[in-house]
């Protein structure tokens, strides 16, 4: 009898932990995020994006990403597995003349290097990482 009760308690704990893990990863990635930090360039963030901050939108149902580099729009296939993410798939990118200098190039090249993500601050902050290093940070819009 005691073994049966312990088995049921263990099973309940396992089921609860599985549900929590799913809610913390892919489920909260959905939606539009606005960039507020990018690593690497020697130019200040506001200098890279003086008029408009880049955004990224995750559509998990259609497995698509889209967004804006602060000048041009982009879209492509979304590849997510747990907390692993892949932005190396070919993306469509408009070709408007941009006055923001290096901003677009910095955004796209840093995005391509990201291979994992984490969501913090109760689902309000998205960190894209290359290995263990956060290379981009977004705020939920």
Image (cartoon, rainbow, N blue to C red):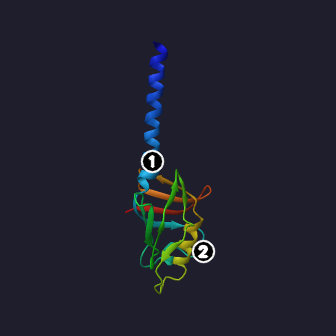
Q: CA distance from mark 2 to mark 1?
A: 33 Å
Q: Is residue 21 left or right of residue 133?
A: left
Seen at 45% across and 47% down, the residue is: 24
Residue found farthest to the left? 141
Say what secondary structure mark 2 lies in.
loop
Say what secondary structure mark 1 lies in.
helix
Q: Position of residue 14 (x, y in %)?
A: 48, 32
Residue found farthest to the right? 131
Q: Position of residue 113 (x, y in %)?
A: 60, 65
Question: Is 19 situated above or below 118?
Answer: above
Seen at 55% across and 80% down, the residue is: 102
Seen at 45% across and 24% down, the residue is: 9
> Label 2, on which residue?
42
Instruction: Tell me the quarter of the image containing the N terminus.
Output: top left
Q: Nearer the viewer, residue 137 or 93?
A: 93
Question: Is 12 situated above or below 2?
Answer: below
Q: Nearer the viewer, residue 1 or 126?
A: 1
Q: Position of residue 70 (x, y in %)?
A: 45, 76
> Mark 2, residues whose alpha carbon is within 10 Å: few (<14), some, or many (≥20)?
few
Q: Position of residue 19 (x, y in %)?
A: 43, 40
Q: Nearer the viewer, residue 56 or 36?
A: 56
Total numbered labels? 2
> Label 1, on which residue?
24
Mark closer to the observer (2, 1): 1
> Mark 1, residues whose alpha carbon is within 10 Å: few (<14), some, or many (≥20)?
some
Q: Is residue 30 left or right of residue 81?
A: left
């Amino acid at each position: 009898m005691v073994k049966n009760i312990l088995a049921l308690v263990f099973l309940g704990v396992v089921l609860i932990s599985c549900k929590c893990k799913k809610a913390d990863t892919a489920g909260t990635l959905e939606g539009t995020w606005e960039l507020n930090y990018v690593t690497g360039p020697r130019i200040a963030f506001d200098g890279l994006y003086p008029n408009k901050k880049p955004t990224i939108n995750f559509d998990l149902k259609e497995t698509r990403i889209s967004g804006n580099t602060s000048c041009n729009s982009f879209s492509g296939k979304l590849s997510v597995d747990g907390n692993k993410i892949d932005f190396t798939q070919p993306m469509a990118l408009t070709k408007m003349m941009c006055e923001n200098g290096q901003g677009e190039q910095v955004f796209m090249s840093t995005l391509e290097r990201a291979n994992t993500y984490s969501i913090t601050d109760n689902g309000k902050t998205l960190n894209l990482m290359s290995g263990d290093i956060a290379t981009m940070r977004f705020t939920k819009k």
